[in-house]
């Protein structure tokens, strides 16, 4: 470990930031899996509410500097596309 006071402080800050980033990424994975499980169960209401929560968490990660905007947009787009596959109005129009 470093000997200078500023280097020690920088190291401590990096550990704190790494822990916060890890927590945020874990939240993203949790809410993404909630959306995917709701889609697997064909439950549109639960999937759409989980999607809104996941969207909120993912976009919050951008503003906290954990993810970049393009990655967040890609994640939200993929989840929305999943939810749209079980949309009741979409299913009725295509049957």
Image: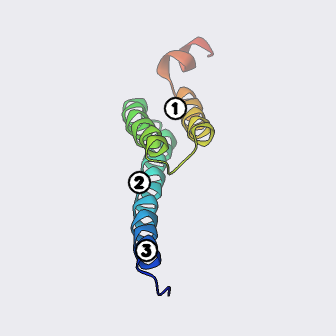
Q: Residues within 10 Å of mark 1 (few under 14, many from 20)?
A: many
Q: Residues within 10 Å of mark 2 (few under 14, many from 20)?
A: some
Q: Position of residue 35 (x, y in %)?
A: 46, 42
Q: Earlier in the sequence, mark 3 or mark 2?
A: 3
Q: Is residue 13 above or below residue 38?
A: below
Alpha carbon separation for disc pair 1 and 3: 49 Å
- Left or right: 76 with respect to 70? left
Q: Report if the CB atoms under discs 3 and 2 are less than 8 Å apart.
A: no
Q: Using the image as rendered, state which of residue 67 and residue 49 is in the foreground.
A: 67
| Viewport quadrant of the C terminus | top right
Alpha carbon separation for disc pair 2 and 1: 19 Å
Q: Earlier in the sequence, mark 1 or mark 3?
A: 3
Q: Using the image as rendered, state which of residue 44 and residue 17 is in the foreground.
A: 17
Q: Position of residue 38 (x, y in %)?
A: 44, 42
Label 3 belongs to which residue?
6
Q: Is residue 50 above or below residue 85?
A: below
Q: Which mark is residue 62?
A: none
Alpha carbon separation for disc pair 3 and 2: 32 Å
Q: Position of residue 83 (x, y in %)?
A: 52, 32
Q: Residue at x 41, y 43 (%)?
A: 57
Q: Residues within 10 Å of mark 3 (few under 14, many from 20)?
A: few
Q: Is residue 65 above or below residue 9?
A: above
Q: Is residue 90 above or below residue 17?
A: above
Of badges 1 and 3, the one in the foreground is: 3
Label 2 belongs to which residue?
27
Of badges 2 and 1, the one in the foreground is: 2
Label 1 belongs to which residue?
83
Q: Residue at x 42, y 48 (%)?
A: 31
Q: Position of residue 40 (x, y in %)?
A: 51, 43
């Amino acid at each position: 470990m470093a000997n200078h006071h500023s280097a020690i402080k920088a190291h401590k800050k990096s550990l704190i930031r790494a822990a916060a980033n890890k927590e945020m990424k874990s939240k993203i994975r949790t809410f993404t899996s909630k959306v995917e499980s709701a889609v697997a169960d064909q439950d549109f209401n639960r999937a759409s509410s989980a999607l809104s929560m996941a969207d909120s968490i993912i976009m919050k990660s951008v503003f906290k500097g954990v993810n970049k905007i393009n990655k967040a947009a890609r994640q939200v787009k993929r989840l929305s596309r999943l939810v749209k596959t079980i949309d009741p109005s979409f299913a009725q129009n295509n049957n």
